Image (spheres, rainbow, N blue to C red):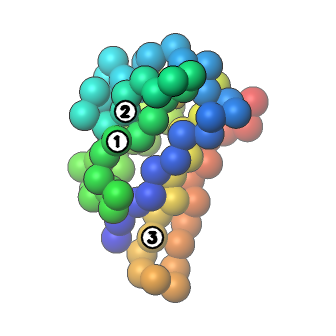
Amino acid sequence: MFGKVYVNENRCIGCGFCMDQNPSLFRLGEWHSEYIGPEKAGPEEIALVRHAQALCPAKAIELLILYSDEQAYQIKPAEL
Ligand code: SF4
């Protein structure tokens, strides 16, 4: 199992919460946060990203869990 992480730049307001909590996983890009963690996030990174999802006021962090090449499950931030 591994995860793919994506910051929706149309939603991110650049508040910095995710970067403050996880500077090894997120950094500020030109206008919004960027995910800089491993391309295939492992269980530890997935747990940190899920925590960041809960903190994100703009619900901008998206996480796709891949169990295999055929099976995927998307953990979307709650709708606003
Ligand atoms: S917490 Fe959410 S809104 Fe704030 S910088 Fe991170 S992704 Fe953007």
Residue lying at 46% horizontally and 50% vertically, measured from the top left = 5
In primary-sequence order, the first of circles 3 and 1 is 1
- Residue lying at the far right in this picture: please name it: 80
In primary-sequence order, the first of circles 2 and 3 is 2
Q: How many marks?
A: 3
| CA–CA distance in space, label 2 to label 3 | 21 Å
Relative side of 27 to 55, left or right? left
| CA–CA distance in space, label 1 to label 2 | 5 Å
Query: Which quadrant would residue 40 be assigned to in this image?
Result: bottom left
Which residue is labeled 1 in the image? 36
Is disc 1 in contact with disc 2, using a CB cutoff of under 8 Å?
yes
Q: Residue 31: where, in percent of width, then height?
A: 56, 22
Callout 1: helix, strand or loop?
loop
- The CB of the residue at mark 3 lies under 8 Å from ligand 1: no
In primary-sequence order, the first of circles 1 and 2 is 2
Residue lying at 37% horizontally and 32% vertically, measured from the top left = 26
Query: Which quadrant would residue 50 be assigned to in this image?
Result: top left
Give the vertical position of 39 relative to 79 (above or below).
Answer: below
Callout 2: helix, strand or loop?
strand
Give the vertical position of 18 relative to 5 (above or below).
Answer: above
**Disc 3 residue type (three-letter):** Leu
Q: Nearer the viewer, mark 3 or mark 1?
A: 1
- The CB of the residue at mark 2 lies under 8 Å from ligand 1: yes
Is disc 2 in contact with disc 3, using a CB cutoff of under 8 Å?
no
**Disc 2 residue type (three-letter):** Phe
Relative side of 56 to 24, left or right? right
Q: Which mark is residue 66?
A: 3
Q: Which mark is residue 15?
A: none
Callout 3: helix, strand or loop?
strand
Task: Assign the N terminus to one quadrant of the image.
Answer: bottom left
Q: Which mark is residue 26?
A: 2
